[in-house]
Image (cartoon, rainbow, N blue to C red):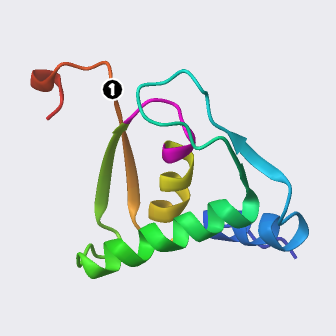
Amino acid sequence: MIVPFSIRDFLDRAVTVYPDRVAVVDEPDQPAASWGELTYAEVMRLAQAQAARLDELDVPVGGRVAMVSQNAARLYTSFFGVSGWGRVFVPVNFRLAPAEVE
């Protein structure tokens, strides 16, 4: 029987099997402070915290959450924090001019 993996299932499995393995390495030369290396367990903790904050803000399941970011650990953890808890992650290219973001 084939059972599809959800985004959250993917992260849950990675945390169960490889909790201390490096999941993402942040680029040190970026405008925002680098987070360095994050393990799967740390990514899960940050994703859960973001999902909890979205709950506090009453962002509904199925609601859209846009994020302007470079390709960084924040984008990676936000992808899981938003999509992993049933919301729609909308990445916005940080190079766009304000008039282009609508």
Left or right: residue 98 versus residue 24 is left
Give the camera-side residue of 49 and 7: 49
Q: Nearer the viewer, residue 86 or 37?
A: 37
**Label 1, on which residue?**
94
In front: 20, or 68? 20
In the image, the segment drawn in magenta is 69-74
Asked whether residue 73 is drawn in magenta, I would say yes
Q: Kindly tell me whether residue 41 is visible in this rendering.
A: yes
Residue displayed at 85% across by 61% down:
20
On screen, residue 85 above or below 77? below
Give the image location of residue 29, x and y in percent.
55, 21
Position of residue 40 measured from the top left corner of the image (x, y, whole percent): 74, 60
Residue 74 sits above or below residue 30 on the image: below
* Residue 19 appears left or right of 26: right
Image quadrant occupied by the N terminus: bottom right
**Residue type, mark 1 in image:** Phe
Is 44 positioned to the left or the right of 51 in the image? Answer: right
The residue lying furthest to the left in this view is 99
Q: Secondary structure at mark 1?
A: loop
Q: Looking at this rendering, what residue extends furthest in the front direction? A: 33
Instruction: Identify the residue at horizontal 33%, vertical 26% (top origin).
Output: 94
**In the rendered view, would you say 18 is above or below 37?**
below
Label 1: few (<14), some (14–19) or many (≥20) C-alpha neighbours in 10 Å: few
Residue in view at x 14 percent, y 35 percent:
102
